Amino acid sequence: MAFTITQLCTDCKDISCTQVCPVDCIYEYTGDDPSIPKNMLLIDPDECIDCNACVPECPWEAIFENEEVPDVFKDDIELNAKIMDQPRIVPERPADMTNPTPEEVQTNKEKYGYAD
Ligand code: SF4
Ligand code: SF4
């Protein structure tokens, strides 16, 4: 099954999710393949244990169980899988990071044509 981080994470990367993942399977890509983004995090679907801990922790509401990924973000399921066997790190949340306002979360969703 696994969980997927969607484009809603792009350029946000506040890195709340890595702090709660019990198996450290949420990664930042560190390689040179331009088809794998570095400005968002990605979940290794082989390592994810489907615990759901990251979903409520994400202030940008960017993470979904694969079966619940909105249509507009369906391609992100494959994108997350690309992180398998790649150069990668589990980033730490910066100490000075603050969470977005509800308005910022909504504006970010609208940017991708997604409103729940
Ligand atoms: S569902 Fe659990 S194991 Fe999977 S990425 Fe989220 S926190 Fe990690
Ligand atoms: S908590 Fe959400 S927005 Fe922040 S880095 Fe993780 S997936 Fe991206």
Image (tube, grey):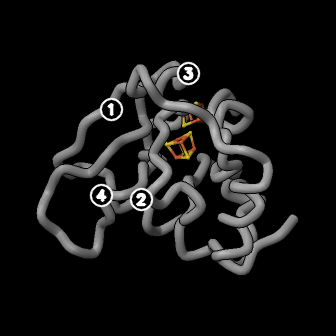
The response on whether ligand 1 sits within 8 Å of label 3 is yes
> What amino acid is found at the position of numbered circle 2 in the picture?
Ala
Q: Is residue 86 left or right of residue 99?
A: left
- Between marks 4 and 2, how big is the CA–CA gap? 14 Å
Residue sitting nearer the eye, 31 or 103: 103
Is ligand 1 less than 8 Å from the beta carbon at label 2? no
**Which residue, given by chain and number where applicable, does mark 4 sit on?**
38
Relative side of 67 to 89, left or right: right
Residue 83 can be seen in this image = yes
Of the residues under marks 2 and 1, which one precedes in the sequence? 2
Residue, disc 3:
20
Quote the CA–CA distance across marks 3 and 1: 12 Å
Tag 4–tag 2 contact (CB < 8 Å)? no
Name the residue nearer the viewer: 48 or 32.
32
Q: Mark 3: which secondary structure?
A: loop
Question: Whole-Å distance between the Cαs marked 2 and 1?
Answer: 18 Å
